[in-house]
Amino acid sequence: MKDWFIMGGSLFMSILTILLVIIVAVSVYFAVAIASGKANEKVNFSHQLKYVKSIGLFTMIIGILGQLIGLFSAFTAIEAAADISPAILAGGLKISLITSLSGIVIYLISIIIWFLLDLFYQKKLD
């Protein structure tokens, strides 16, 4: 995991990690609000639960942006080198996928968390 973080680029991987921590913190806040009964007092609580999905979607977009910026700089270096082997090209493409893959995985985690929180909230209402 540490190797992926370093290979993916510290800037974008740090942003993705911070967003994952924010998703977990917001989810814990909502879970505590549901468990303590404070969620029933709020008018649009089910709408507020969508913040978890929204932050996850933002994470996926940041991951794709990181991939595109990495590809742009890789193609600029390939253009300057003129002659490059296919193995080096494939290795560079593989590394560029790390940020987008991480962003998509975090987005899937946020959707699962949102689904579970919404299910927990609906059960609490009944």
Image: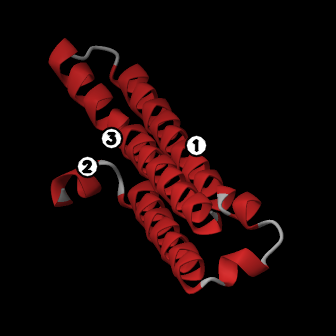
Q: Which amino acid does label 2 sit on?
A: Met
Instruction: Tell me the distance, in whole angstroms, between the alpha carbons under discs 1 and 2.
Output: 19 Å
- In this picture, residue 58 sits left or right of residue 40: left
Q: Are marks 3 and 2 in contact (CB under 8 Å)?
A: yes
- Determine which quarter of the picture holds residue 88: top left
Q: Which of marks 1 and 3 is nearer the N terminus?
A: 1
**Quadrant position of the N terminus in the picture:** bottom left
Residue 62 x %, y %: 55, 48
**Quadrant position of the C terminus in the picture:** bottom right
* In-front residue for pair 33/22: 33
Q: Which amino acid does label 3 sit on?
A: Ile
Residue 109 x %, y %: 41, 51
| Residue carrying label 3 | 98
* In-front residue for pair 91/119: 119
* In-front residue for pair 88/83: 88
**What residue is shown at x 52% (from left), y 50% (from top)?**
115
Q: Do the residues labelled 1 and 3 touch (CB within 8 Å)?
A: no
| Residue carrying label 1 | 61
Residue at the extreme right: 43
In the rendered view, would you say 70 is above or below 55?
above
Callout 2 secondary element: helix
Q: Which of marks 1 and 2 is in front?
A: 1
Instruction: Tell me the distance, in whole angstroms, between the alpha carbons under discs 1 and 3.
Output: 13 Å
**What residue is shown at x 50% (from left), y 31% (from top)?**
72
Query: What is the number of the mark on residue 7?
Result: 2
- Determine which quarter of the picture holds residue 92: top left
In the rendered view, would you say 3 is above or below 43?
above
In the rendered view, would you say 25 is above or below 48?
below
Query: What is the number of the mark on residue 75?
Result: none
- In this picture, residue 123 sits left or right of residue 7: right
Residue at the extreme front: 126
Callout 1 secondary element: helix
